[in-house]
């Protein structure tokens, strides 16, 4: 049989080379039919074969042989039904029963092509069976296997075309479910292949994923397909992130990974239990740090682009300590890079955002030591900003006042500084901010930090620092 298959392949190739495409296609179809027949026979033999009443033996053959011998339909159907019941009880989804019933049905070519790693042709070989929906299926006649001999036209037609499914209850439904199963596996395989092949892999993969979800919905199975997409998208994103890391292509590959995960997240909805959201945030964090710092060998670092990525990442995953830490640092570095007096308002807003980021981080995870260090850095920058905004006389007065501040009335130093800030904040907002910074240094608790966050936010909205920013 292998020799015959080889000969058919050679004739098909010669016909195509000679410009006889139709002849080549016919020989290719013959070769496929032979492959289906041989594979079905092997599958049947693997189960022990069909029982025959006369003589008392077993038989292994293919669907064409069964079509020529209608008396074999009943023992084939009984064998498939028994395997289906046994494997269904064990939770086996694609066992010998599945392989056998598909091989002896209209799905035989499709499963053969899928096993030959030709998923595009496998979908075509289904001839639209997978496009039917459960609600559009005609009702079964209700006859058991073998009633074809009693003259039921429906049983006869179905058993001729699908002897592998003829012995199953709800046979039309089972045939559709198997067709959809094969189609979705083919679409997922095509998506995997396009991702591996590279661009335009992402767009092509999304088209195949959408097709798989659409087809799966015909039998109410779209959730399972969406769940199958998630690990593929996560795995490919990791490959894209790692394969050119530290090179000129790093930014491009990270962007492709982010686009893939974002599109997959939108496609599957909420079935991924947050895995894709977390991965997108992780990738945005990595790209943000790359753009803000690590890309210096290949491109001009940009705090603005880096911070934008990190902001998006934190919105997606507010619980990420790494993202929050990097964003706070990025905002501080960006503020430090602004030196012109006209940029004072922008500095104030960046430092205020960094302070808010750290404050919220400490509220969420007070035990995270790194946030304490970042808070100290933000306070230092805030204090320097305030000093730059004061005149020499005001600065000298503030330094002298700081040295004389001492607790009174049994209150803490922080409480006294807050009261002093409250008195000054309207007329002398920078001086009031300095007192609150000192109060946080004295007592970095949540309540005192919140006062400083509020004051910094109000200050950044004042006209003298909001214009030109």
Image (cartoon, rainbow, N blue to C red):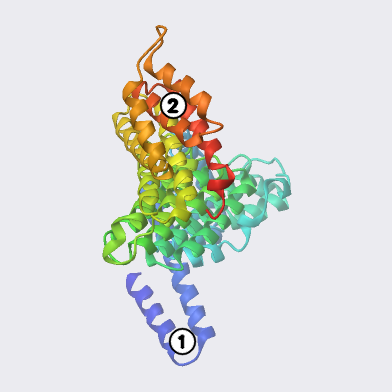
Q: x, y percentage for residue 469? A: 52, 53
| Residue most extreme to the top | 410
Residue 328 in percent (x, y) is at: 38, 41
Distance (Cα) linking label 2 and label 1: 78 Å
Q: Is residue 227 left or right of residue 251?
A: right
The answer to which of 137 and 133 lies nearer the viewer is 133
Q: Would you identify the image quadrant in which residue 1 lies?
A: bottom left
Q: Residue at x 43, y 45 (%)?
A: 281
Q: Residue at x 50, y 79 (%)?
A: 25
Q: Which residue is mark 2?
A: 449
Task: Please state if 393 lies on the left or on the right of 153 as rendered.
Answer: left
Is 403 in front, or is 346? 403
Of mark 2 and mark 1, the one earlier in the sequence is 1
User: Which of the pair 326/67 is nearer the observer?
Assistant: 326
Q: Position of residue 338 (x, y in %)?
A: 40, 54
* Residue 111 position (above or below residue 421): below
Crowding at dot 1, Cα within 10 Å, few <14 / some 14-19 / many 20+, comes out as: some
Instruction: Determine which quarter of the picture holds residue 405.
Output: top left
- Residue 5 lies in what quarter of the image? bottom left
In the picture of the structure, the residue carrying the numbered disc 1 is 16
């Amino acid at each position: 049989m292998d020799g015959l298959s080889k000969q058919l392949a050679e004739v098909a190739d010669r016909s195509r080379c000679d410009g006889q495409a139709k002849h080549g296609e016919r020989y290719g179809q013959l070769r496929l039919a032979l492959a289906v027949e041989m594979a079905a026979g092997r599958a049947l033999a693997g189960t022990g074969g069909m029982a025959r009443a006369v003589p008392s033996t077993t038989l292994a053959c293919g669907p064409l042989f069964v079509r020529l011998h209608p008396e074999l339909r009943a023992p084939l159907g009984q064998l498939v039904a028994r395997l289906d019941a046994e494997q269904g009880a064990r939770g086996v989804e694609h066992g010998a029963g599945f392989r056998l019933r598909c091989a002896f049905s209209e799905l035989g070519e499709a499963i053969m092509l899928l096993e030959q790693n030709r998923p595009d042709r496998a979908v075509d070989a289904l001839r639209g069976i997978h496009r039917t929906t459960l609600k559009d299926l005609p009702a079964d006649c209700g006859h058991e296997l073998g009633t074809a001999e009693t003259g039921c036209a429906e049983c006869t037609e179905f058993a001729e075309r699908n002897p592998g499914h003829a012995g199953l209850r709800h046979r039309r439904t089972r045939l559709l479910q198997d067709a959809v199963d094969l189609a979705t596996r083919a679409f997922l395989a095509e998506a995997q292949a396009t991702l591996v092949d590279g661009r335009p892999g992402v767009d092509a993969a999304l088209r195949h994923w959408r097709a798989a979800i659409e087809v799966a919905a015909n039998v109410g199975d779209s959730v399972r397909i969406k769940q199958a997409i998630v690990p593929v998208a996560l795995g490919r994103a990791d490959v894209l992130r790692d394969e050119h890391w530290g090179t000129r292509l790093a930014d491009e590959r990270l962007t492709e990974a982010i686009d893939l995960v974002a599109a997959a997240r939108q496609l599957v909805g909420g079935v991924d239990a947050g895995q894709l959201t977390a991965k997108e945030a992780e990738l945005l964090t990595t790209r943000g740090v790359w753009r803000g710092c690590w890309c210096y060998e290949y491109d001009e670092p940009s705090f603005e682009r880096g911070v934008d990525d990190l902001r998006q990442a934190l919105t997606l995953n507010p619980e990420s300590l790494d993202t929050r830490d990097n964003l706070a640092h990025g905002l501080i570095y960006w503020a430090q890079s602004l030196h012109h007096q006209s940029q004072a308002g922008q500095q104030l807003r960046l430092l205020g955002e960094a302070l808010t980021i750290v404050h919220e981080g400490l509220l969420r995870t007070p035990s995270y030591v790194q946030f304490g260090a970042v808070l100290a850095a933000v306070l230092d920058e805030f204090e320097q900003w305030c000093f730059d905004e004061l005149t020499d006389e005001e600065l000298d007065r503030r330094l002298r006042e700081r040295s004389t501040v001492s607790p009174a009335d049994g209150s803490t130093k922080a409480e006294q500084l807050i009261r002093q800030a409250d008195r000054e904040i309207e007329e002398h907002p920078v001086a009031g901010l300095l007192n609150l910074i000192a109060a946080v240094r004295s007592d970095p608790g949540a309540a005192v930090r919140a006062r400083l966050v509020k004051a910094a936010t109000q200050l950044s909205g004042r006209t003298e620092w909001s214009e030109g920013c």
